[in-house]
Image (cartoon, rainbow, N blue to C red):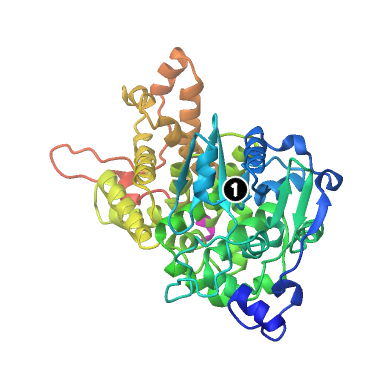
Amino acid sequence: MIRKLIGRIFGRKPKPGDHPDTWVKRHAEVFRASELGLDLQAVSHAAMRTCESLQQAGFAAYVVGGGVRDLLLGRRPKDFDVATNAPPEEVLKLFRRARVIGRRFQIVHVHHGRDLIEVSTFRAIQADAQTDAHGRVLADNVWGTQEDDAARRDFTVNALYLDPVRDQLLDYHHGVRDLKAGILRIIGDAATRYREDPVRMLRVARFAAKLGFRIEDGTRAPITGMADLLRHVPSARLFDELLKLLTSGHALASIQTLRAEGLHHGLLPLLDGIFASESGERFIQQALSNTDARIAAEKSVSPGFLLAALLWPQVLAAWQPRVAAGEHPMPSLLAAADAVLDQQSDRLAVQKRFAADMREIWSLQLRFERCTGGAPLRLLEHPRFRAGYDFLLLRAQAGEDCAALSAWWQSFVEGGDSDRTDLLAQPPGKGAPRARKRRGGRRRSRSEAQGPPQPSA
């Protein structure tokens, strides 16, 4: 009887060593949320209204996932998701501003003013789900029970269901216990779950870093041997997951966790390049530390700027031989940028708008070398000046040979008219290679002959 139940729920027979708590369907532990220290007042008005409307229509409705986890940890959730037994068409009837999105995994976006709530219907565990050749689930819109939905969640600490109306919290997989112990544990057999969706391996790294949790041994064990499955994930989805990791507020720790778990090798040329040299790694660490600090201060972060920083060491490495061979600095820089971006395109679908931002930020580094005449004042009017200027400061902060140039521009940006006049009469020392001047014959400047700046060793 138990074997049949397990087969029906999970689509496979239990294996030796499987923990019975993981595979046998069971009732939830029920807690009073407020007694666990969860502040119900911190639940957004939009999430509360969504749950109330669904419940008044006769459906179950719970805040679920990271929002509940963060509330229990005393953190302010970034957003709130709602899970319900109402199918999407019923959700659409209840809310005037709602629409279904997604094909493989349908959810309903419900808008309350400027707030957006993602409403998903409880999913069933499919024993005969449609998968690709590598086991990744391709279609996932079969509705099920709340117990099934909980078993399908990735980690125990993300499988907590909060009814904010009744002050109840349902826990099917001992998520509260793991939350208190600081353990990140996957639900079910880790290898099977990674095969269903290889992106879960990246989520292990992101959540472990974000929460500061220890990765449970069984959750960690299969990762090294299954990392190659990430090669079969669509590049657009991989890009979205990478952005989540980089803008989590714990980007540096996440990248370090990826490295510790062996997920950086062969996953993305971008991550391989981060650890190619000590100087490049130092530059990336500085960029990610700055990004984490901005997010902690609730400041905005530009994905284009962040990606430009991550790929800058590779752009430098591709740029240097071109300039040394006698190519003009600006065209050779743009050619190097295109070569690096093309290398990424096989695994990472960088959106065109971000790629355009990256190219501009990189090209501006040469324009900062023009510190005489009207060039600096014209550069101040460039629409991407601030991003390029911040990038120059980052280069100096990370130890590149552009400290004098960075200091000059800081004085120029912050100074008054008279200060700027004095600065224009006293340009800084060399930094990035200057574009050579042609006077009669083709001549190479001293800085061009030396090649582009490299991160200090």
- View extreme (top): residue: 418
Place of residue 239 in the rendered image (x, y in percent of width and height, measured from the top left): 45, 55
Image quarter hosting the N terminus: bottom right
The residue shown at (66%, 33%) is 45
The residue shown at (21%, 44%) is 443
Judge left or right: residue 37 versus residue 216: right
Judge left or right: residue 450 versus residue 60: left
Above/below status of 180 relative to 375: below
Q: Can residue 425 be seen in this view?
A: no
- Region rendered in magenta: 276-280
Quadrant for residue 157, please give it.
Answer: bottom right
Residue 184 colored in magenta in the image: no
Magenta residues, dominant SS class: helix
In the depicted view, which residue is nearer to us: 125 or 384?
125
Place of residue 235 in the rendered image (x, y in percent of width and height, measured from the top left): 40, 60
- The residue that mark 1 highlights is 248
